[in-house]
Amino acid sequence: MDFKALGIPKAQWVEGNILRGNKLAQEIRKIIKEKISSASQKPGLAVILVGENPASVIYVNQKEKAAREVGFHSQVLRLPSNTTENDILSLIQELNDNPLIHAILVQLPLPPHLHEEKILQSILPQKDVDGFHYENVGKLYAKNPTARIPCTPLGIFVMLSLLEIPLVGLHAVVLGRSRIVGKPMAQLLLDYCNTTVTMCHSKTKHLDKIISSADILVSAMGQQDVVKSNWVKEGAIIIDVGIHRKEGKLEGDLNFEELCPKASYITPVPGGVGPMTIAMLLWNTLQNFHELYGL
């Protein structure tokens, strides 16, 4: 995964020590748009949204807009919250068989009456754009270059790669063990950055001591006020995946104002990791398109 070949200089997206993921995402979207501009067929992305979860509706609208802006064939299938599991499985089978669709995404969370794993595993691995299919999970852990990697950790990996600073041997601490961010992030840091990785979670003891030794800190806890700013060492690279709405503002897991002066690099919220997640959704869709058509 040589993202350095994208040739996007730091000056276009790094302001001081702040990693402007929104600006980097814009550059990546320009590259994707250019790559498919002369293609006779366009990459096709289908998103399935079940119900009307307010956050999910916003995310799906953002994904649809981004896909259309780069020239993808975009299809959003909005289903009522009482849709049956069999109906969703039938729809996914139709999309699996549809040659115009190269990437299928089921927006999470699903309503509680639906079996999430059964639905996600029904997507063809070649059309899995989220990296949740067991085949892609196995490929990631086997360091197989054809693995589809979950979009958020992949976006973070791209940012770290394009910084072009030595990461080998650094201590990376990942807060959170979800399959969406924490686990794949730890694997990328271990296998592709050659860092020493510690994964922390709600049962971890002596969290302050572990964090204080982190050269790279990735927070994907989904909680605020867990990490005290004085735990974080001077010069750490700080990646904040959290998104919280507080008094009408979006904030991350961590205190940006307190940590920015002591970080070598830091992502803001908003404008940091979030836009890179959508950019990597488009990137994975493009990779699926290339592999399905042998391009």
Image (cartoon, grey):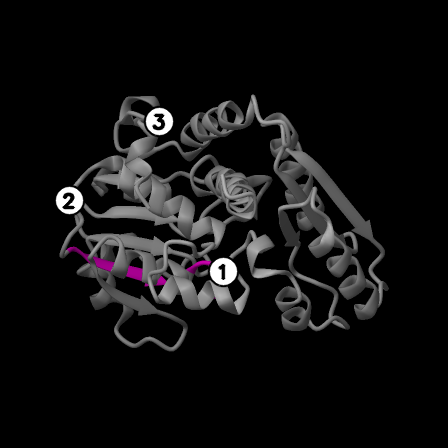
- Which residue in the structure is indicated by mark 2? 166
Q: Is residue 82 magenta?
A: no
- Lower position in the chain sequence, tag 1 or tag 3: 3
Task: Name the amino acid type tagged 3.
Answer: Trp
- Lower position in the chain sequence, tag 2 or tag 3: 3
Question: Which residue appears at 26% of the width and 27% of the height?
Answer: 16
Q: Which mark is residue 180?
A: 1
58 sits to left or right of 291 = right
Q: Is residue 176 visible?
A: no
State the extent of the magenta-drawn residues as a range: 170-181
Secondary structure beneath dot 3 equals: loop
Residue 267's quadrant in the figure?
A: top left
Q: Which mark is residue 13?
A: 3
35 sits to left or right of 166 = right
* Residues packed near mark 2 inside 10 Å, few (<14), some (14 to 19) or many (20 plus): few
Q: CA distance from mark 2 to mark 1?
A: 26 Å
Residue 41 against residue 220 in the figure, above or below: above
Q: CA distance from mark 1 to mark 3?
A: 25 Å
- Lower position in the chain sequence, tag 2 or tag 1: 2
Question: Which residue appears at 28% of the width and 69% of the height?
Answer: 207
The residue lying toward the viewer, choosing from 48 and 139, is 139
Residue 210's quadrant in the figure?
A: bottom left
